[in-house]
Image (cartoon, grey):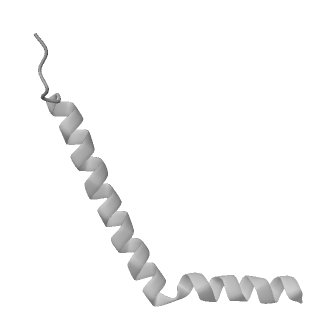
């Protein structure tokens, strides 16, 4: 007899992955808003050009 329900561990892993992804996306948005990533890239480009 087959069931269509997923095991509890599988459901927990999916939920954990989704929550982790959401947290990482929030952190990435905050990081981009601060502008550190672009300013670091510009500084690195200037150092390489010099």
Tell which residue pokes out farthest to the right in this image.
50
Tell which residue pokes out farthest to the top in this image.
1
In the image: residue 36, left or right of residue 11: right
In the rendered image, which quarter contains the N terminus?
A: top left
In the image: residue 4, left or right of residue 22: left
What is the tally of numbered marks visible in this picture? 0
Residue at x-position 54% and y-position 85%: 36
Residue at x-position 22% and y-position 48%: 15
Picture coordinates of residue 50 (x, y %)?
89, 89
- Above or below, 12 relative to 25: above
- Above or below, 25 relative to 4: below
Residue at x-position 14% and y-position 26%: 4
Picture coordinates of residue 16 (x, y %)?
25, 48
Camera-nearest residue between 1 and 37: 1
Residue 19, image quadrant: bottom left
In the image: residue 44, left or right of residue 20: right
Picture coordinates of residue 27 (x, y %)?
38, 72
Camera-nearest residue between 19 and 48: 19
In the image: residue 17, left or right of residue 5: right
Residue at x-position 84% and y-position 82%: 48
Picture coordinates of residue 24 (x, y %)?
37, 65
Residue 25, image quadrant: bottom left
């Amino acid at each position: 007899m087959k069931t269509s329900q997923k095991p509890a561990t599988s459901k927990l892993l999916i939920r954990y992955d989704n929550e982790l992804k959401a947290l990482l996306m929030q952190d990435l948005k905050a990081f981009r808003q601060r502008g550190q990533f672009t300013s670091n890239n510009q500084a690195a480009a200037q150092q390489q050009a010099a």
